[in-house]
Amino acid sequence: MKKLLLILLFIPLFVLSQDRVKFIASGLTCSMCSRAVYKSLQSDKDIVKIESNLETQEWNIEYKQGTYTYDKLKKSVEGAGFGVEMVWLNGELIIDNRKKKK
């Protein structure tokens, strides 16, 4: 019982100690595209969770706190052959690469 209480006490600390990143990828057209990005992101040992939605091209990933950098994310996505359109860090929009429509 004591072990369970200790585990339950430390779970919130682990969850709070992660940077939540949401981004929209550009150029994804199929599940194979999504898989390529997933595999590229998976090689980053600072990422603890990856979720994607092919229809919206949205990705939700969690990094160990303090390890996220835009350059690292961009390198992973572009390394798979795609682009990063928009990025939110912990709910705040920090990058918007969309072209202005005329």
Image (cartoon, helix red, strand yellow):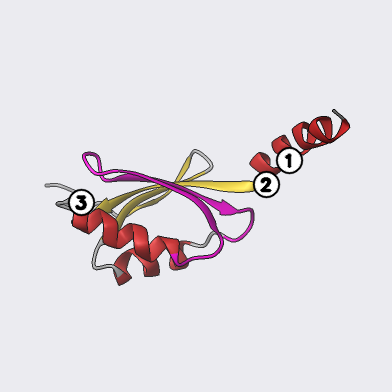
75 lies left or right of 32 = right
The x, y position of residue 56, in whole percent, is 24, 39
Residue 43 is drawn in which quadrant? bottom left
Say whether marks 1 and 3 touch (CB < 8 Å): no
Q: Which of the numbered marks, if any, corresponds to residue 31? A: 3
31 lies left or right of 9 = left
**Residue type highlighted by circle 2:** Ser
- Residue position marked by numbered label 2 in the rendering: 17
Residue 47: in magenta span: yes
Return the disc, 2 or 3, that comes first in the chain's sequence: 2
Question: In the rendered image of this protein, does residue 11 appear above or below residue 85?
Answer: above
**Residue type highlighted by circle 1:** Leu
The x, y position of residue 65, in whole percent, is 64, 53
Nearer-the-camera pick, 75 or 15: 15
SS class, disc 2: loop
The residues colored magenta run 43-67
Nearer-the-camera pick, 12 or 72: 12
Residue at 26%, 54% (x, y): give it. Answer: 34
- Residue position marked by numbered label 1 in the rendering: 13
